[in-house]
Amino acid sequence: MSSLELENVDVIIIGAGPTGLMLACQLSLYGIRFRIFDKSADHTTQSRALVVHARSLEIFDQLGLADEAISRGEIGQGASGFFNGRKRIEIDMNLIRTQNITKYPFMLILEQSQTEELLEEFLVKRGIKIDRQCELIDFVELNDGLIECTIKDIRNTTDERLIKIRTKYLCGCDGAHSKVRKNLQLSFTGNTYQETLFVLDCHVKFFDEENISNTATMQFNMTRSGFCLFFRLKNYANEHRYRVIGTIPHHLLNSINELKFEDIQSSISQHIERKVELYDEIWMSIYRTHHRHVETFSVRNKYFLVGDAAHIHSPVGGQGMNTGLQDAFNLGWKLAFNIQDKVTNNDELLKTYNEERLRVAMELVHSTDRAFAFVTNSHWFIRFVRIRIIPYLYQYIVYPLIKYISYIRVGLFKRLSMLAIHYRLSSFSIGDSSKHDKIQPGDRMPYVSTHPNILSTSIDNYDRLCFHFFILINPKHKNRNMAYLFIQFIENHYSDLIQVHQFEYSNETKEIFDAFAVIKDTIGGGFLIRPDQYIAYSTKTFHIQHFTDYFSRYFQSKNLNS
């Protein structure tokens, strides 16, 4: 065993799954020195996580990867629901689509292997190397505040080496069994479900194909013994290749010590009460799912847990990987601001990562817990409701509400697509507007369908890390000069941190005003947009001192200080 000389970097990322790769991509945009390690030899070749929601596609868009992701995946068109073997529900996913809230009004079926490959290709193009077959052994905090990590390098099996590397920040993106979390001795509170699940990729033959719509990218089956989902995988439609996930019946678990594909294969028809055949297994995994989260996502604002290292939950809703991507998106720019010495207090900004993402994770864990408990509960009444009542509820209540009431349709899509996530309760979200306003600090920046590129997402614009201030002005208002003076002040004193976008009310800009809920008869409104596209600050009064008091709490401006 040999050791290498010490190296200093700004950030070390442990884990090169989707979450770690996304964090690496974000840091690379801002020119941050980092290393990313993973103990596996290559990115996963299995489908694993399968759903990419609209909010994650918006993040991909900032990397210039959204179009490529869509080309590699399949847009969810519909779903067929079978209850005790009978088709009772046909869901048209286009029904809940809405064109005015996002550039990506759909759910994308994309194998995790493709997601990882896409992000890794992005890093390679930027000259970033992933250190694979490198495992974190330990880390200690030194007297100077740096963290020294010991990494075992097993790329050369004949001569294992220890890498000693020092960093300002350590990010654990190393999954549910996180070594970073364990070494920090953080509890992972929650429970393990009784139900055992199987997940596999294989080929499937359905003997009731006349009941399956050509647009059905997903089939879900609800029976007395549990549930089973079939996801059609793109590029394999002619081969009838599917991702299959479901509960394992208790009688099967009790009779077999080690379940194999053949066991699932022989019991699947009985399990879902439909005649199907599974063949040509590609991979398979048996596991029990959990709902757990840490009590804090960060320790002393030096150690950060991201993705599954911080929270795990049932696969209901397909939100696990997406939540990890958004964790990384939230943390990346905050680390960059700190490392580039643009903050007044190192802890003030970084603490908002835990503040914002812990709340999201807790809500997600609890909501998926309730949903999973409902679809797996064996109590006779719950089972009766699940199998007998749900189809009628959907047909006569849910479907008409979604089809004919746009407010419900939009609300449902926002929740499913993760566009409804907000940071209104964050200490970083401040404004002089009313709490009853439609658009508030902490909300995701609204999408303007007539101006889809209102905030450019091209990676060519990442030459500097900054905020975007949208100033909407009524040029006919008697107090309009207050808005113009506000703009002048921002440009004179914060040009190194804030890029101003000025819009005056007209027929061409009307939809921008509508999207931000700015009434044309008022003076206007201002909205400070964070690098992760959430509103940090809003104003109706354009009071310079109010904004300065807020912004200087977190950031220092060279222009203002000079």
Image (cartoon, rainbow, N blue to C red):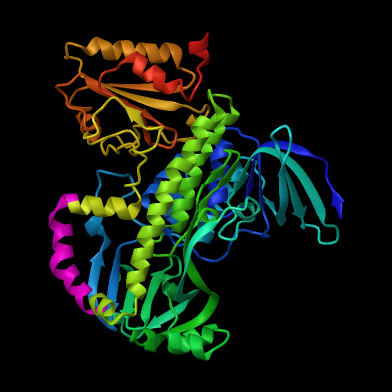
Q: Is residue 377 left or right of residue 17?
A: left
Q: Indicate the quadrant containing the N terminus: top left, top right, bottom left or bottom right.
A: bottom right
| Main secondary structure of the magenta stretch | helix
Work out whether residue 545 or residue 465 is closer to the camera in this orientation and state it: 545
Q: Is residue 261 left or right of residue 399?
A: right
Residue 244, quarter of picture: bottom left
> Would you place residue 492 above or below residue 416 in this image?
above
Identified at 39% across, 73% down, the residue is 230
Identified at 50% across, 88% down, the residue is 254
Locate residue 353, reporting x and y percent: 48, 40
Work out whether residue 280 or residue 168 is closer to the camera in this orientation and state it: 168
Q: Magenta part of the protein: which range?
A: 387-407
Residue 393: in magenta span: yes
Locate residue 304, reporting x and y percent: 57, 44
Tag count? 0
> Would you place residue 550 above or below residue 329 in this image?
above
Q: Is residue 8 left or right of residue 387?
A: right
Locate residue 306, reporting x and y percent: 53, 49
Identified at 31% across, 84% down, the residue is 208
Residue 282: in magenta span: no
Residue 61 visible to the viewer: no
Residue 306 visible to the viewer: yes
Locate residue 197, reporting x and y percent: 47, 75
